[in-house]
Image: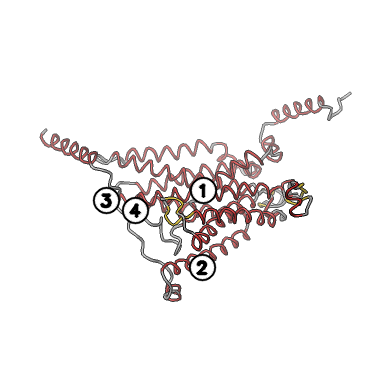
């Protein structure tokens, strides 16, 4: 018909126009207003904008560090909840940018489906974590045992429901944009949720694997800012014009020294070095163990040059302090690239910060953009150089088998130990 022909022509013209236009960038996201507390504004009113920003950032940084110490005192389970809250806030900030840029299209169900997919992915990851680390608790409770057995099937069914809802929400003339936003949501999930899941895995290996890497990133961020503020002259990268080589180098050396000292302090306390375990007798989560060799002081012979310089033939260190050099070096050299990536993202959408949650610092994502790279590195580092077979987990898995399977493994292990001469043969 004539109406359908004109509609098809309009669609064709619209597509050709959009394809022929140069990429001028997305519509600007509204710039958040200055949310600096009025008390600070009055107290710092006589300072220049540069020094005012320095004081605001400094005061809020001290407040955040104090809060960090407080949640560490509350223990690993509270830390896990804080990680979940930070993850949700970071997801909200990134999704809000997508909605703010493209809200004029009135895409149906975009925000609802985004949050639904967040729920699905968290259900999958947290279920895997509980099953992996606390299988003795799962096996004790009938509902948990059923959920654990069919966990992946339930997770897939939940995701499949969201997938079908997305397909049903597709609207004519906006297909390409809707698929673009579908990809936006999934990339956000990959960056935010997956990395926060790795942070929690690091935490369960021992709080020291959570605190030291995060503290090294915080230290590098602070010291790089301080060195850059007072000594910075040489620009480092165009994505972040305020970053300087002086700040980058000063932050590196400061962070390595800080990581070694912090590791020495924390490695002597079982509260920080022991993995989180579920005590079935007390029906509670506990952090109590005999520290491994990694957290036992050992003597290391110094090279001849250092011995002549210091006069010490040996140096007494925790082995973890040596590993902390790798962690702090990564936090200083590669961690900032997470910030550069975030800077490129913000420049692409013509925004200064992800949000205005923290005065002088921007949004939560602005503070944690470097932490996600660090979380992946720590998880890979533990798997590559630290973690070995865990006897407790092996026993838990064996107890979950059928009795005939347990008996078969027992006989196989007995035969193996007898052949090795560790058990005497029965007469």
Quarter of the image where the N terminus is located: top left
The first of marks 4 and 1 along the sequence is 4
SS of the residue at dot 1?
A: helix
> Circle 1 sits on which residue?
372
Q: Looking at this view, is 109 or 48 the one in front?
A: 48
In this image, 123 relative to 276: left or right? Answer: left
Q: Position of residue 32 (x, y in %)?
A: 36, 61
> Circle 2 sits on which residue?
59
SS of the residue at dot 2?
A: helix
Cα distance in 3D space between marks 2 and 4: 28 Å
The first of marks 1 and 3 along the sequence is 3
SS of the residue at dot 3?
A: helix
Cα distance in 3D space between marks 4 and 1: 23 Å
For marks 2 and 3, give the one nearer the viewer: 2
Taking 187 as reference, is 46 above or below it? Answer: below
The first of marks 2 and 4 along the sequence is 2
- State whether residue 45 appears in this view: yes
In this image, 361 relative to 126: left or right? Answer: left
Q: Position of residue 218 (x, y in %)?
A: 55, 56
Q: Looking at this view, is 46 or 373 the one in front?
A: 46
For marks 1 and 2, give the one nearer the viewer: 2
The number of callouts visible is: 4
In this image, 160 relative to 147: left or right? Answer: left
The first of marks 2 and 3 along the sequence is 2
> Circle 3 sits on which residue?
104
Q: Position of residue 344 (x, y in %)?
A: 40, 49
Q: Looking at this view, is 228 or 22 the one in front?
A: 228
> Circle 4 sits on which residue?
350
Cα distance in 3D space between marks 2 and 3: 39 Å
């Amino acid at each position: 018909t004539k109406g359908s022909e004109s509609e098809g022509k309009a669609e064709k013209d619209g597509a050709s126009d959009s394809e022929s236009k140069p990429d001028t960038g997305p519509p600007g996201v509204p710039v958040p207003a200055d949310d600096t507390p009025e008390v600070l504004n009055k107290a710092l009113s006589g300072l220049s904008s540069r020094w005012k920003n320095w004081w605001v950032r400094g005061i809020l940084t001290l407040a955040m560090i104090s809060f960090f110490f407080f949640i560490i005192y509350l223990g690993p389970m509270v830390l896990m909840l804080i990680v979940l809250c930070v993850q949700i806030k970071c997801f909200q900030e990134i999704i809000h940018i997508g909605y703010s840029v493209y809200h004029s299209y009135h895409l149906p169900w975009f925000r609802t489906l985004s949050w639904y997919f967040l729920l699905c992915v968290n259900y999958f990851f947290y279920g895997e974590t509980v099953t992996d680390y606390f299988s003795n608790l799962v096996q004790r409770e009938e509902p948990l045992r059923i959920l654990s057995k069919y966990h992946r099937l339930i997770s897939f069914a939940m995701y499949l429901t969201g997938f079908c809802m997305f397909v049903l929400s597709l609207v004519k003339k906006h297909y390409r944009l809707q698929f673009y936003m579908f990809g936006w949501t999934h990339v956000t999930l990959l960056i935010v949720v997956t990395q926060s899941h790795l942070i929690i895995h690091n935490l369960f290996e021992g709080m020291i694997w959570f605190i030291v890497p995060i503290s090294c990133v915080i230290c590098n961020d602070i010291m790089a800012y301080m060195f850059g503020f007072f000594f910075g002259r040489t620009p480092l990268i165009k994505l972040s014009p305020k970053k300087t080589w002086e700040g980058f180098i000063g932050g590196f050396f400061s962070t390595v020294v800080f990581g070694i000292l912090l590791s020495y302090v924390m490695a002597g306390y079982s509260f920080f070095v022991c993995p989180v375990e579920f005590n079935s007798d007390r029906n509670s989560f506990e952090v109590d163990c005999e520290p491994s060799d990694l957290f036992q002081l050992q003597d290391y012979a110094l090279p001849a040059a250092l011995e002549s310089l210091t006069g010490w033939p040996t140096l007494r260190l925790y082995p973890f302090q040596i590993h902390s050099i790798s962690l702090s070096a990564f936090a200083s050299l590669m961690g900032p690239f997470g910030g550069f990536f975030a800077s490129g993202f913000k420049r692409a959408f013509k925004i200064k910060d992800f949000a205005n949650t923290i005065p002088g610092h921007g949004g939560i994502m602005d503070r944690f953009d470097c932490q996600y790279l660090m979380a992946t590195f720590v998880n890979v580092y533990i798997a590559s150089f630290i973690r070995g077979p865990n006897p407790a987990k092996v026993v838990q898995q064996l107890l979950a088998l059928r009795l005939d399977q347990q008996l078969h493994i027992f006989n196989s292990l007995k035969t193996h130990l007898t052949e090795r001469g560790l058990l005497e043969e029965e007469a």
